[in-house]
Amino acid sequence: MFDPEAMRTFTISDDLPASNISALLLDREGGLWIGTGYELFGNQPGSGLARFDPSVNDASSRGMQTWTRTDGLLDNRIFCLYEEGPGGG
């Protein structure tokens, strides 16, 4: 059930790689994966993939970890996220 008191907003100042979100996935461990793609207007490229870990309570990282092409992604534009079942493919 939606709880407006527990709602959290992420911005670039929270280490989100971009403001143009194109994919979301809540994983089994409670982590929120955030993919960025092209903005609808302006054609700004995506800036990669991020994962927010709500269990991290560290002001320096804010629980946000990011990956880009520099880290090995094939592209910074992320349009779909999928979590495999237990044990993988």
Image (cartoon, grey):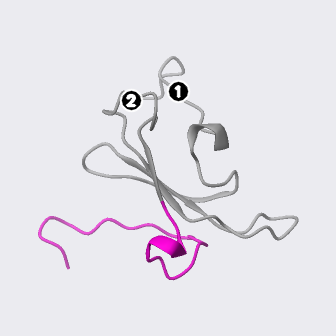
Identify the image quadrant of residue 78.
bottom right
Quadrant of the drawing holding the N terminus:
top left
Residue occupying image coordinates x 52% and y 27%: 7
Check the image and name the residue furthest to the right: 42
Q: Earlier in the sequence, mark 1 or mark 2?
A: 1
Check the image and name the residue furthest to the bottom: 74
Q: Is residue 60 above or below residue 84?
A: above
Identify the image quadrant of residue 30.
top left
Question: Label 1, label 2: how many angstroms apart (C-alpha)?
Answer: 19 Å
Residue 45: horizontal and vertical position, in percent? Answer: 73, 70
Closer to us: mark 1 or mark 2? 2
Residue 79: horizontal and vertical position, in percent? Answer: 57, 70
- Crowding at dot 2, Cα within 10 Å, few <14 / some 14-19 / many 20+, comes out as few
Front-most of residues 14 and 60: 60
Numbered-mark total: 2
Secondary structure mostly seen in the magenta stretch: loop
Residue picked out by circle 2: 58
Residue picked out by circle 1: 7
Task: Describe the element under mark 1 as helix, strand or loop.
Answer: loop
Front-most of residues 48 and 79: 48
Q: Is residue 19 above or below residue 49?
A: above
Q: Name the side, left or right, on which 88 lies relative to 76.
A: left
Residue occupying image coordinates x 45% and y 27%: 59
- Crowding at dot 1, Cα within 10 Å, few <14 / some 14-19 / many 20+, comes out as few
Residue occupying image coordinates x 45% and y 71%: 71
- Confirm whether the magenta stretch covers residue 63: no
Check the image and name the residue furthest to the top: 5
Q: Which amino acid does label 2 sit on?
A: Asp
Q: What residue type is labelled 1?
A: Met
Front-most of residues 48 and 25: 48
Magenta residues?
67-89
